[in-house]
Image (cartoon, rainbow, N blue to C red):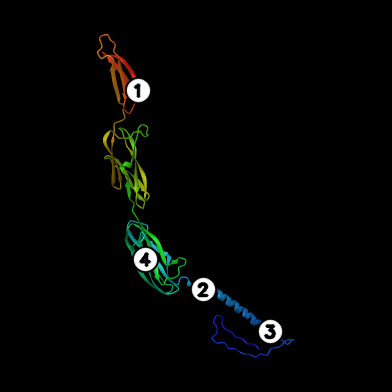
Amino acid sequence: MASSVLTSIGKPPTQLSLIKVRFSYPEDSKGHSTVLGQALTMRASYVRQTFASMCVLFLVIPLLSVVSATGSGLLLDTTTLVVVGNLEEGAGDVNISIDVKSHDIASVGAINMTLIEGESTIIVSDNVSLNLTSDEITTIQFNISQLAIGQYTLNLQLFGEVGTPFANHTDLISQFVKRLAPANAQVSETSQWQIIPVNPTSGEASGNSSFRDGDIGWAEVPVTNSGEVDFNGSIGFAIDDESYLFQNLTISPQSSTSVNFSIPQLFESNSTSLKVNLSGQVTTHDMSVGPPPLPRLEIIANVDNSTPQLGQQVIWTVNLSNSGELAWIGELQCTFSNSVVFSESFFVN
């Protein structure tokens, strides 16, 4: 006699029925039913297959539940964040856009945008309500008008039926937003200029502390860019009322450079003006040009007998000194009664 109950795997029956069936089985020489043996063998194979199938299901079902739990609500797609106006020059508009998706289920909530200056000063704040169907995506935009120069912290945060963050999907984004200060080039104070006289004959620095008649030279003028973008312009140099000679000038953000100018031959003057023109702003340095370097010979003569008698000898002692900037080279000559009584060449340093 055999009985069996068959059900669909994964769907237990609500009611079990016992079915009794009578069979007449042929027997072998030992009195054993051959049909019954085959049935038992098939029954055992079926049980093994059923058990294996249920094991596979038990392994797969937990994995499916983990996958479906990821997301399950509102999340921001970080790969879609666009901030137009970030790292641009001067005050200006900043436009923000980002995609929000309701993963797996319909979700209700809101997205909040705040722009913070420093540690906690809120410059701008805005909210947008969300009511999305399952797997619906919507693009949210925020517009900020004429944001001032400076660095800010942008925060985007979801509220309500928020999902579980994964991969590039999250419920909070925080990043810097900055408007750059324009280029601002300034010529330094004239006390910082290096003005170097040059000997026109040798082409080397003369060593004089100031310009002298006939000197040429050069000037080194520091220029600073305090802005946050490159300065690209021109700078000019002139003497007194002469025309400016311009050259191109590029200065990196928040850095300084020295600009070299050639000074043409100058002549003795009480006041000579060196002028630097940067973007229409003129800086002037006034200086005097002294006479050329010259020797300055001084002669002191002493006599041993200021009232000599006729026929007496008179001895004159002459001292030569030079207080000038160059050596004196010349001849000392003494005459008496239109006759040369002494003549000799001298070098006085």
Q: Which mark is residue 64?
A: 2
Q: Is residue 31 above or below residue 282?
A: below
Q: Secondary structure at mark 4?
A: strand
Number of numbered discs: 4
In-front residue for pair 62/104: 62
Instruction: Say few, some or many: other residues with alpha carbon within 10 Å of mark 3 (under 14 / 14 to 19 / 20 or more).
Output: few
Q: Viewed as shown, does residue 184 lie left or right of 59?
A: left
Q: Which mark is residue 333?
A: none
* Numbered disc 3: secondary structure: helix
Q: Mark 2 or mark 4: which comes first in sequence?
A: 2
- Residue 321: x and y, percent? 32, 23
Question: Mark 3 or mark 4, which is nearer to you?
Answer: 4
Look at 67% across and 83% down and name the residue there.
Answer: 38
Label 2 sits on a secondary structure element that is: helix
Q: Amino acid at mark 1?
A: Phe
N-terminal of the pair, mark 2 or mark 1, is: 2
Q: Please state if 296 lies on the left or on the right of 67 as rendered.
A: left
> Mark 3 sits on what residue?
37
Q: Quadrant of the C terminus?
A: top left
Disc 4/disc 1 C-alpha distance (Å): 89 Å
Separation (CA) of disc 1 from disc 3: 144 Å
Q: Nearer the viewer, residue 138 or 16?
A: 16
**Residue hosting label 4:** 113
Tag 1 secondary structure: strand
Q: Residues within 10 Å of mark 1 (few under 14, many from 20)?
A: few
> Label 1 belongs to which residue?
347
